[in-house]
Amino acid sequence: MKKLGLVLILFIFILTACGSDEDVIKIGSKNFTESLILGEMYALKLEEAGYEVERNLNLGGTMIAHESLRSGEIDMYPEYTGTGLINILEMEPDSDQQAVYEAVASAYEEEFDLFWLEPTNANNSQGLVTTAEIAEQYDLYTISRLQEVASELRLASVPEFEEREDGLIGLEQAYGEMNFASIDLYDYGIKYQVILNGEADVTVGFTTDGDLTSDELVLLEDDGQFWPPYYVAPVVYGETLKKQPEIEALFNEVSALLDNEVLQQLNAEVDIEGREYAEVAKEFLEKNGSSFE
């Protein structure tokens, strides 16, 4: 009887260990469309390979996601090199793509035991956007040209843009003062509609926004290279990568599929066409060779 009891205890222990949280890979994301799509893609790739995945998507902003990763509450989330450099590490901006990646990868490993995997070719940097009509009227295709004609144009600003060092303050330091005819504040969700409706002429955008698939909008070239690169990559909890190093290759397979044009299109399918981000992520991977039951 004693022997049977010991066998039963051992059996229960094995079942508990096999079903423990340590065998579940927890994927996080921030609280905007692109991050949700990316988080879902990385989760699906793991599931395709047979891993059990827990989704902790839509966590919130940068600091919430970062602290969740540092504490081990999640095992990975997609982050941007420029965000890591400026917002997390509080380093000086740098326009060199490789230098920024190497700086954040080295500092994250040393300070946090977090590991940046291979970056995508998608650079979701900030930018300034106008309409095709205004661009043609003012020969406006670069930010340096915008500085010359700003006094004739109305800016549709977004929250914090006028106060941030990587917003209007820094932009004027790099290009010179921009005396816009007017500056009005709008929500992120309506900024493009505002300029398309003729209520303003220029707004703040991000270079992988789905709206930029429209021929009616023009993203101005950052010809003075003010904004640092914001290439997105998976960042992984150190202990997780040590225990399961094979997941690196799976994450990198997904990252290799992504560039600005791809993310613009995927974001547009969610934000403009109204599709579910999980459906869009799955369909994209299936088109690129993945198979899900």
Image (spheres, grey):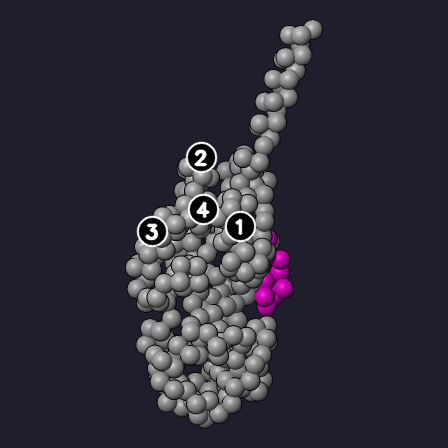
Instruction: Decide if residue 78 is on the left or right side of residue 176.
Output: right
Q: CA distance from mark 1 to mark 3?
A: 20 Å
Foreground: disc 1 or disc 2:
1
Label located before the other in sequence (2 or 3): 3
Q: Going from the N terminus, do you reach mark 1 or mark 3 first?
A: 1
Instruction: Give me the C-alpha separation between circle 2 and circle 3.
Output: 20 Å
Q: Which amino acid type corresponds to the residue marked 2 in the rendered image?
A: Lys
Give the residue drawn at x 32%, y 67%: 95
Dot 4 alpha-carbon crowd within 10 angstroms: few under 14, some 14 to 19, many 20 or more: many
Alpha carbon of mark 3 to alpha carbon of mark 4: how far?
A: 13 Å
Which of discs 1 and 4 lies nearer the camera? The answer is 1
Q: Between marks 1 and 2, how big is the CA–CA gap?
A: 19 Å
Ranked by sequence position, the earlier of labels 1 and 2 is 1
Q: Secondary structure at mark 4?
A: strand
Residue 84 placed where, x, y %?
Answer: 42, 59
* Mark 2 crowd level (few <14, some 14–19, many ≥20, 10 Å Cα): few
Marks 4/2: CA–CA distance? 12 Å
- Say which label, 3 or 4, has the lower sequence index: 3
Q: What's the mark number on residue 243? A: 2
Quick one: SS at disc 1?
helix
Quadrant of image for the N terminus = top right
Instruction: Report the span colored magenta.
Output: 270-278
Query: Is 48 in the magenta?
Result: no
Q: Amino acid at mark 3?
A: Ser
Mark-to-mark CA distance, 1 and 4: 11 Å
In the picture, the disc for residue 68 is 1
